[in-house]
Structures are given as structure tokens and as C-alpha cells.
Image: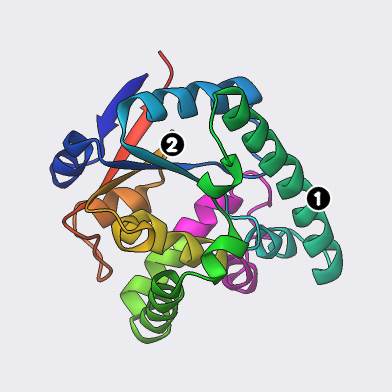
Amino acid sequence: MLVRPLSPHCAPALGTRIHACLGISPFNGYFTTERIRDLAAWALKRFEAVHLYVPDGPTAVTLQALGYPPARAAAKARAQCRYLRNKMVRVLDDLGLAEPERLILDSAALSDNTRYTDLLGRVHTLFDSDPVFQRACLEATRWVLDGRLTPDQMTEARLRTAVPYLLAELPLFTHTPDIVGRSASVFCYHRPPRFVNDLFHHRLAWRPLARQGFAVVTRP
């Protein structure tokens, strides 16, 4: 795998090899079974502990922003994320992991995590109170929806509908060590938006832990 720390702040956490959190996105053709297997096998070999994060619950708001009615969006998100989760479990099982479900951080697992829920509340408070941070989050959401909506459809209302998806991810981007109880962690993804680059260059009001890294991980 090709591995690049997103900023100089990320290199120390990556170097510890203590924990990796692998971001796996629903409705993203990049995450074939083969790619998930390669990514998981690489991480399990390199790090002491690994989790796979899938934003299953928040996916529904993205679908709502694309025009799906809330009930239909929730049902479609559940079906797709169930399929993706089953694929992840099979991959981990094939790699010899006992109780592979325990390695998956989804909405159900995170809802019982008091540190995550506390951080999520703080992220929402910052979004509501800091106009600069709010605008950065909305612009990052624009990146998520780009290509799925025409410029005329990309309204402020749609961005605000979809932004909880990003806000739900932020604690994992920046505070995974606290969430999983490890001294350091690296979030791994193949194509982070500029917003994440700004996070790890300390250009935003929300800051990652010093023990948190972010790595761009791709196959050669």
C-alpha cells in the first residue's frame, strides 16, 4: 500500500503503529470486496489494533439532500449499509479474525460510546456557534454532493440537510484514540477532501488530538 501522512502533525501517530481506523464509505464504488480485503490485511499486519468505520446512520441525510423522502432515504441507507457491513464481516472472517463484528464502528456501536456522543455534541455546538467553521463544513458537504446534483440544485437548504453526515465523521477523524481507548490512532482513507487537509494543518477551530493522525492510503 502507498501510505502518506496528510500533514507533519500526522507522522508521529502513524509511526507508533498502535491503531488504525479505516474509513469505508457507503455508495462508493471504490470499496470493492478486494479493496476492503487489501486495506484490512495491510492494516492488521501493520498496526496493533484496527477498526473499520462505516457511517451507516448518517448516510440517510445525504440521500435526503439528493431528494429522497426521509422514510425512503432511511430504508435505502439501511439496505446499502447492511450489504456493506456484511461484506466487511466476511472479509474480516476470511482474514482469520475472531468476532469480526467487534472491529466495526457503526452507528449502533458509537451510540453506546459516551466519548463519541460527547464529541458529537461539541461538534454540533461549534457548527451552530462559529460561522467560519460552519461555512467550512457546508463547503465540505458541497464536495460530498458534487456530481450528484446540478449547480442549481446545490442549495443552502440541501447542504444543511446533508451536513450531519460530515459532523458525524469528525470525532473519528480527530479523536479516535479517546473513542477506542488507545494511546494513538491513524484514520485511513484514500481521498480526503480539502476540509480534512485543513483540519490536520490546524486551520479550523476544531482540532485533532496530538495523538491522532490521518493517512492517505491507496494501492500502488
- Viewer can see residue 30: no
What is the total number of numbered labels drawn onto the structure image? 2
Counting from the top left corner in percent of width and height, residue 39 is at: 47, 27
From the image, tell me which residue sits under label 2: 191
The image quadrant that residue 129 belongs to is bottom left
Relative to the observer, which residue lies in front, 165 or 160?
A: 165
Kind of element beneath mark 2: loop
Is 59 placed left or right of 191 in the picture?
A: right
Foreground pick, 135 / 185: 185
Residue at image x 35%, y 34%? Answer: 216
Residue type at mark 2 is: Arg
| Disc number placed over residue 125 in the picture, else none | none
Amino acid bearing label 1: Ala
Find residue 123 and report its horizontal and vertical position in percent.
39, 75
Residue 2 to residue 44: above or below: above
Which residue is at a point 21% across and 60% down the rendered structure image?
A: 209
Circle 1 residue: 79
- 106 vs 130, left or right, is right
Structural crowding at the residue carrying mark 2, measured as other residues with C-alpha within 10 Å and reported as few (<14), some (14–19) or many (≥20): few
Specify the quadrant that holds the C terminus.
top left
- Mark 1 neighbour class, 10 Å CA radius: few under 14, some 14 to 19, many 20 or more: few
Q: Is residue 151 magenta?
A: yes
Hey, which residue is sitting farthest top in the picture?
A: 220
Magenta range is 140-163
Q: Residue furthest front?
A: 98
